[in-house]
Amino acid sequence: MFDFGKALELLKKGKLVARKNWNGKDMFIFMRPSDDLNEDFIIDKVKSLPISFKEWVKKNPSENGIVKFNNYLCLKSANNEIINGWIPSQTDIFANDWFEFIP
């Protein structure tokens, strides 16, 4: 068991982490790494972005044709959904019951 600082270190290394006291079965978090995507790829292939954003990309091309997406945390919920943009609670931040989740 370790604190949230150690959990962040592991997340940055591509590991999965969880809390012992979470109620949901097999819940864990992971870091979605940053990515540079070609504008044409975004417009033609990426299903997870709304058409309105794709239209904005078309109308506002960058100098290099690339859109940078920053990294973020995701939660794998107890019902097997991935929740993008997970934000830790104050309780999560100060907890000492974090562990590396190994599937």
Image (tube, rainbow, N blue to C red):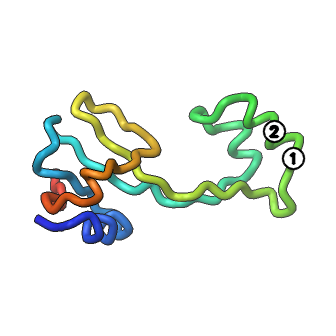
Residue type at numbered disc 2 = Trp
> Hey, which quadrant is residue 40 in on the image?
top right
Q: Which residue is drawn at 81% across and 34% down?
A: 55
**Quarter occupied by residue 70:** bottom right
Q: Position of residue 39 (x, y in %)?
A: 75, 49
Q: Check if mark 1's residue and mark 2's residue have beta carbons within 8 Å.
A: yes
Q: What percent of the width, then of the height, locates residue 80?
A: 27, 32
Which residue is at the front of the view, 45 or 10? 10
Side (left or right) of 25 relative to 41: left
Residue 49 screen position, x and y as percent:
63, 35
Q: Label 2 belongs to which residue?
A: 56
Residue at 11 percent across and 50 percent down: it is 20
Circle 2 Cα neighbour tier, 10 Å, few/some/many (<14 / 14–19 / ≥20): few
Q: Which mark is residue 60?
A: 1
- For the point 35% across and 50% down, the residue is 88
Residue 32 picture location, percent across and down: 44, 54
